[in-house]
Amino acid sequence: MTIKAVIFDLDGTIIDFNLNYKAVRAEVIQFLTNQSFPQSIFSMNESVFEMLKKMEIYMKNNGKGEQEMIKSKKAVLSLVGGHELEAARSTRLIPGVLETLKVLKKKGLKMALFTLNGEKSVSYIIKCFRLESFFNVVITRDFGSAVKPDSAHLEAVLGKLNVKPEEGIVVGDSVWDMMCAHELNVIAIGVVTGISSLQELTRAGATYIASSFTELPTLIQQLNKS
């Protein structure tokens, strides 16, 4: 086996993103309620993307057209994007990330980002920390309707990198990262620097668990020998 590419999540994996998710969810629910959606169909325990799915189902069931759904979705994501851009200004790299990316680049590995964050905040972060030279491909949630946990998000990254699933690894902190990788038979490395616990990552299909980002070069070297 030869690993040719490493595909990273962003928030909780590369950066410590200072976003108040509860505040964002509350504002989204308030916005949707003001747009005449029943507040009872949404929950603070759901991600914004889960709320959007419920919003679309409600609109379909009430005879709303696709253009209306697109307009409502854009309005919600614009609201979220404003919070993300504000949070991006106070974010920081997770310790060891920059040094590790340099090591992986020297090894000739292709690298990519696939993230649920929006284009504006991701571009800001990449420029702020001068990460442009590390990533061959960056696909944000603006890629389209198929974003993680839909494996089409990861599939698009593999296609742009021109690597087979068995030639790549996914590194992420969430169960959605692990699920995407597992579905496409891509090696999944869970990092416990973000949202999910070791147990949650393992249950979601993590092939390996790394307690630190700096473990990646050694782990990849071991995989190449196996």
Image (tube, rainbow, N blue to C red):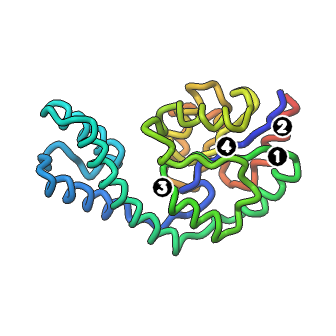
Q: Provide residue 209's location: percent of width, then percent of height.
A: 65, 42
Tell me the element at label 2.
helix
- Give how far apart the Cα atoms at labels 4 and 3 are: 17 Å
Q: Provide residue 225's location: percent of width, then percent of height.
A: 88, 32
Q: Mark 4 points at which residue?
A: 7
Tell me the element at label 1.
helix
N-terminal label among 2 and 3: 3
Number of on-image labels: 4
Dot 3 amino acid type = Gly
Residue 118's disc is 3
Quarter holding residue 160: top right
**In percent of the image, x 57 and y 67: which residue is there?**
124
Q: Is residue 213 above or below residue 60?
A: below
Mark 3, Cα crowd under 10 Å, few <14 / some 14-19 / many 20+, is many
* Of the two numbered discs 4 and 2 in the rendering, the one whose residue sits closer to the viewer: 4
Q: Mark 2 points at which residue?
A: 222
- Give how far apart the Cα atoms at labels 4 and 1 are: 16 Å
Q: In this view, does 137 lie above or below 214?
A: above
Is disc 1 in contact with disc 2, using a CB cutoff of under 8 Å? Answer: yes
- Give how far apart the Cα atoms at labels 1 and 2 are: 6 Å
Q: Mark 1 points at which residue?
A: 218
* Of the two numbered discs 4 and 3 in the rendering, the one whose residue sits closer to the viewer: 3
Q: Provide residue 208's location: percent of width, then percent of height.
A: 67, 37
Tell me the element at label 3.
loop
Q: Nearer the viewer, residue 33 or 13?
A: 33
Q: Provide residue 194's location: percent of width, then percent of height.
A: 53, 55
Q: Is residue 193 above or below residue 198?
A: below
Q: Nearer the viewer, residue 215 or 47?
A: 47
